[in-house]
Amino acid sequence: MSENWNSDLLSCCDDMKSCCYGLWCCPCLACTVSGLFGQNRCLPLCDICSPAVMSAFGIPLCVPPAGLALRVGIRQKYEIKGSLCKDIATSCVCVWCSWCQLHRELKYRKHTPMQSPVNMQPHPMMALPPQPVFNR
């Protein structure tokens, strides 16, 4: 029942507003995506601070943790095809394109109602036989 991303990673021309927003202020776009997904808007700032803090302790960090977590979360919530390996590669290789794709996806999902797998058909009422009343 999985589906594809609404737009490809390099389909920035599909939504020029998101593309320009990400081009001119990618950290702002990342914070917007985080907020749209219901997370703390400051979460993507961890991606900016994490490498410096981790390298101070001698631990190399090349994967942006917030960007990866949001990408995986969005993919899981909307049942989008993909894998963790692809998410890691996308988050590391093309950070700007990844944030733009996530923004386009959330804008698309906001305007497109999700199909609910819940059956909303009313069930017929069953009449119960009358219960005997006992008097003491």
Image (cartoon, helix red, strand yellow):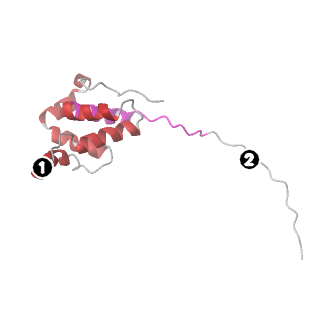
- Specify the segment rendered in magenta: 97-120
Nearer the camera: disc 1 or disc 2: 1
Q: Is residue 123 left or right of residue 109?
A: right
Q: Residue at x 26, y 26 (%)?
A: 9
Q: Is disc 1 surrounded by few (<14), some (14 to 19) or many (20+) residues within 10 Å?
A: few
Say the numbered circle drawn on residue 125. 2
State which quarter of the image contains the C terminus.
bottom right
Image location of residue 18, percent across then percent down: 22, 32
C-alpha separation, residue under disc 1 versus residue under disc 2: 67 Å
* Residue 94 visible (yes or no): no
**Looking at the picture, does residue 27 appear above or below residue 18?**
below
| Label 2: which secondary element | loop
Residue under pointer 1: 58
Dividing the picture into quadrants, the one containing residue 5 is top left
Q: Residue at x 30, y 42 (%)?
A: 70
Q: Is residue 11 left or right of residue 2?
A: left
